[in-house]
Image (cartoon, rainbow, N blue to C red):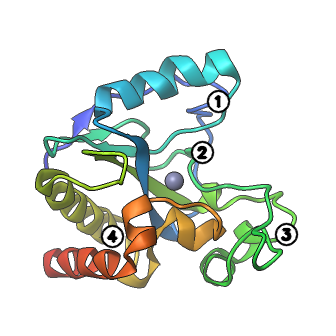
Amino acid sequence: MKIQEKLLTVNKYSRPGKKLAEKRALILHWVGVGGQRAKSVWSYFEEACPKEGHYASAQYCVDLDGTAFRFIPDDEVAYHCGSSQADPVSGKIYTDWAREVFGKYASDPAGNSPNNASLGIELCVIDNKGNFSPDTLDTAAELAAFLCKTHQIPLERVGTHKMVVGWKDCPLLWTKQPELFEAFKKEVKKRL
Ligand SMILES: [Zn+2]
């Protein structure tokens, strides 16, 4: 598939340049701001994160027009689903799903993060309710299938950020309507 390469500069806060230990799962996110374009997400990781001392990034971002960008190579760590905060419901840092999928990478307390064993995709949204454009969804399904095939990640290990940490409403739409995430996974399956 066509992917635009727009790599971040190696830096402590968004592209640490560390190699992934494994590729156990593919985790989906929303960018959190309606109308934000991939270019601006890139600038946030590239400029704002180092300036503010904020750890955040993902290997991929899918724009509103359906363009897929690669921000970090597939064999490097991104900061997208690690946590040090316990879920108020379970009292645990990582969910049962995450502990099962990630094993030692999701043990409490969070010394070894799922970031060391996963790839992350950020999805742009058209509004603050987290709705996706049809183009974003279409490319996201294609990209997810491509990454699953490339790295032998099974469909059951395509998850949301919320499925990893529990308390995080990310991506917002799929948190509110899990059936839409199931529909998305069906689209991924069609392309496998
Ligand atoms: Zn997220």
Q: Is mark 1 within 8 Å of ligand 1?
A: no
N-terminal of the pair, mark 4 or mark 3, is: 3
Q: CA distance from mark 2 to mark 1?
A: 8 Å
Q: CA distance from mark 4 to mark 1?
A: 26 Å
Amino acid type at image mark 2: Tyr
N-terminal of the pair, mark 1 or mark 3, is: 1
Q: Is mark 2 within 8 Å of ligand 1?
A: no
Query: Where is residue 81 shown, x and y percent of the image?
Result: 60, 56
Amino acid type at image mark 3: Asp
Closer to us: mark 4 or mark 3?
3
Q: Which label sits on residue 13?
A: 1
Closer to us: mark 2 or mark 4?
2
Secondary structure category for the residue under label 1: loop
Q: Is residue 1 above or below residue 47?
A: below
Q: CA distance from mark 2 to mark 4?
A: 20 Å
Q: Residues within 10 Å of mark 3 (few under 14, many from 20)?
A: some
Amino acid type at image mark 1: Tyr
Q: Which label sits on residue 108?
A: 3
Residue visible at 36% across and 53% down in the picture: 129
Q: CA distance from mark 1 to mark 3?
A: 22 Å
Q: Are marks 2 and 1 in contact (CB under 8 Å)?
A: yes
**Which residue has dot 4 on it?**
148
Q: Is mark 3 within 8 Å of ligand 1?
A: no
Query: Where is residue 164 shown, x and y percent of the image?
Result: 60, 69
N-terminal of the pair, mark 2 or mark 4, is: 2
Secondary structure category for the residue under label 4: helix
Q: Which label sits on residue 79?
A: 2
Q: Is residue 189 above or below residue 176?
A: below
Q: Which label sits on residue 64?
A: none
Q: Residues within 10 Å of mark 4 (few under 14, many from 20)?
A: many
Q: Is residue 50 above or below residue 191?
A: above
Query: Where is residue 36 shown, x and y percent of the image?
Result: 32, 33
